[in-house]
Amino acid sequence: MASLKEIKGRIASVRSTRKITSAMKMVAAAKLHRAQREIGALVPYARELQAIVAHLAAGEGVVAIPLAEQREVGRVTIVGFASNTTFCGAFNNNVGRRIVELLASDYAEIGADHRRIVAVGRQLGVDLARGKVPFEAVDEELANKPNYLAYRVLAEELIKDFVEGRTDRVVVVYHKFLSAGRQTLVAETLLPIELPEGDSGPTEGPDYILEPSREELIATIVPRQVALRLFTAALSSVASEHAARMVAMQAATENADELIAELSLEYNKQRQQAITTELLDMMGGKIGS
């Protein structure tokens, strides 16, 4: 049985740890609020850009879109999004596990030389290295503070690989942010892009006046949409990371409160027992004299 001094020391230690977890929870909540604002500002633009691409692809006439070419997958590129730090539950491990599952199932027949794994976030690289999965790391700052220009450069590199035949499919694995309490791990195909079926224009929405030609617009807008989807995945991953860390730190703080209550109860019990023992000893000594 632990002594009163040991229990008191442990209570002080748990209280100190609780202060840290509580502070980390508040920091994560503040960062989550900022990330939510960024996603909220981006969604309307992304939705409108997607509608424009759908209109261009579904208009009259046949327009070849190289980034929509469907072909047999002999080479694959997977871009995974995680974080640079820990204390966010199973957030990082889930991304690494999902990539390994994809390689073992959907792309099991593709040789290691024809697989390219791009890891965004230091912890994802740690998990992949532990599983002996070869990967390419990007600038760690992209996992902390997503920058559109940087992700546009990465998107242009992926587009070039796809057009020149160095990869047949590009997949992004990330946590899709739905709310502060709900994030879903998804594996979405970035390339080739999906186009609406049929060759007739959309029946709803605005009637666009195209200037310059549809071909020139597609050549400009479609790569921009790919870059925007990659950037959106990065923002969603960051928001999901902060939400996961906030939940994890909230749980840790609540566990600390419960542990402090249990230790305090045990301390009071032992203290009362010690007082009672001393009283009995004093009474026994007086009677004996």
Image (spheres, rainbow, N blue to C red):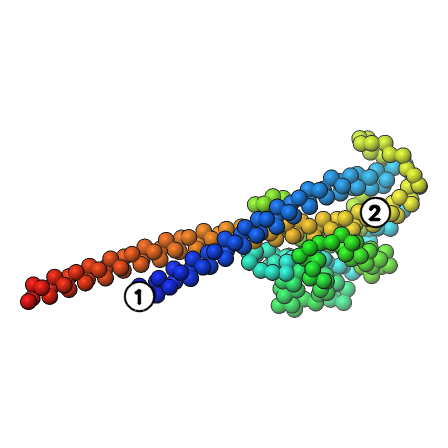
Q: Secondary structure at mark 2?
A: helix
Q: Mark 1 belongs to which amino acid?
A: Ser
The alpha-carbon separation of the residues under discs 1 and 2 comes to 69 Å
Residue visible at 54% across and 50% down in the picture: 26
Q: Nearer the viewer, residue 96 or 112?
A: 96
Q: Nearer the viewer, residue 177 or 188?
A: 177
Q: Picture quarter containing residue 151?
A: bottom right
Decide: is 254 above or below 49: below
Q: Which mark is residue 3?
A: 1
Q: Position of residue 58 (x, y in %)?
A: 85, 38
Whether residue 190 is visible: no
Per the image, the residue denoted by label 2 is: 222
Q: Picture quarter containing residue 120?
A: bottom right
Residue visible at 62% across and 68% down in the picture: 130
Q: Which mark is residue 251?
A: none
Decide: is 111 above or below 256: below
